Image (cartoon, rainbow, N blue to C red):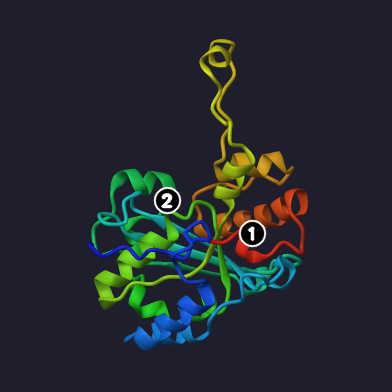
Amino acid sequence: MMGRQHTSANPANPKLAPWPERMARLASEARNPHLKAFYDAGCVAPETPMSQVPLVALDFETTGLDPNTHSIVSIGLVPMTLQRIRCRDAQHWIIRPPLPLQRESITIHGITHSDIEEAPDLTEILAEFLPALAGKVVVVHHRGIERPFLEVALQWRLREGIEFPVIDTMAIEAKLHPRRSPNWLSRVRGKRALSIRLPDSRLRYGLPHYPPHHALTDALASAELLQAQIQHHFSPDTPVGELWY
């Protein structure tokens, strides 16, 4: 599944338009009606305090780590704000990938050939999935998965990609712990690198352990992690533009 990779509006890159303007332009360019409706919903201004930002935590399980050669097999999402996680409105889908499952991925996420046999293709759930994201800032743990995989998947099916702002809880942990890898002397003394994986990051905030590699559970775990990060290191008044990519 080959496709172009959009460049996303990152506050570190001043050449890119802010997300509200970018979404408006993408709405005028979109051909697919689901994508046009998604972009028409827009997004909050960069100066909006986090306490007022509508969010949705998102996680994919995939057949591998390369969006150009692997596929999405499940999607979990949980709507949230900084004050509340709306578990009642959470959604989970098993997706039929265009390529056969690989033994290695089955071992990790537990989704089998029988699970996907009657599962819908991604295009069959767009009418539910994209409205669940529309108008919200997406929360992920490692933005190198969800946005690139969805971009390539839609390019392959619709000949159109997708862009949207994300808050990456892994990137937040990386910035909070810039010296994660010990020097050679510390390694000799037995010191290990600090992990910013989702389960390990949650432990630093006293959050409970959840079994990994289930899209809905990992989305919930990312939602809780963001709330803890804001509480400990930022403020409800922190502008969303300082955190999104």
Q: Which is nearer the eye, 155 or 27? A: 27
**In-image side of 56 versus 31 (left or right):** right
**In-image side of 70 versus 49 (left or right):** left
Q: Residue 223 carries which label?
A: 1
Q: Please give the count of numbered marks on the rendered protein.
A: 2
Q: Can residue 147 be seen in this view?
A: yes
User: Which of pointers 2 and 1 lies earlier in the amino acid sequence?
Assistant: 2
Q: Picture coordinates of residue 106 (x, y %)?
A: 36, 49
**In-image side of 156 versus 203 (left or right):** left
Q: Which is nearer the eye, 46 or 98? A: 46
Determine which residue is flagged by label 2: 110
| Residues packed near mark 1 inside 10 Å, few (<14), some (14 to 19) or many (20 plus) | many
Q: Picture coordinates of residue 116 (x, y %)?
A: 34, 64
**In-image side of 82 versus 132 (left or right):** right
Q: In this view, does 232 lie above or below 136?
A: above
Q: What residue type is labelled 2?
A: Gly
Q: Is residue 73 above or below residue 39?
A: above
Q: Which is nearer the eye, 112 or 185? A: 185
Residue appearing at x 22%, y 62% in the figure: 2
| Residues packed near mark 2 inside 10 Å, few (<14), some (14 to 19) or many (20 plus) | some
Q: What residue type is labelled 1?
A: Ala
Q: Residue furthest front?
A: 15
Q: Picture coordinates of residue 31 (x, y %)?
A: 32, 86
Q: Is residue 58 above or below residue 45?
A: above
Q: Distance between the residues labelled 2 and 1?
A: 23 Å
Where does the N terminus fall, quadrant-wise? bottom left
Q: SS of the residue at dot 1?
A: helix
Q: SS of the residue at dot 2?
A: loop
Q: Can residue 128 be seen in this view?
A: no
Residue appearing at x 61%, y 76% in the figure: 44
Residue appearing at x 66%, y 44% in the figure: 202
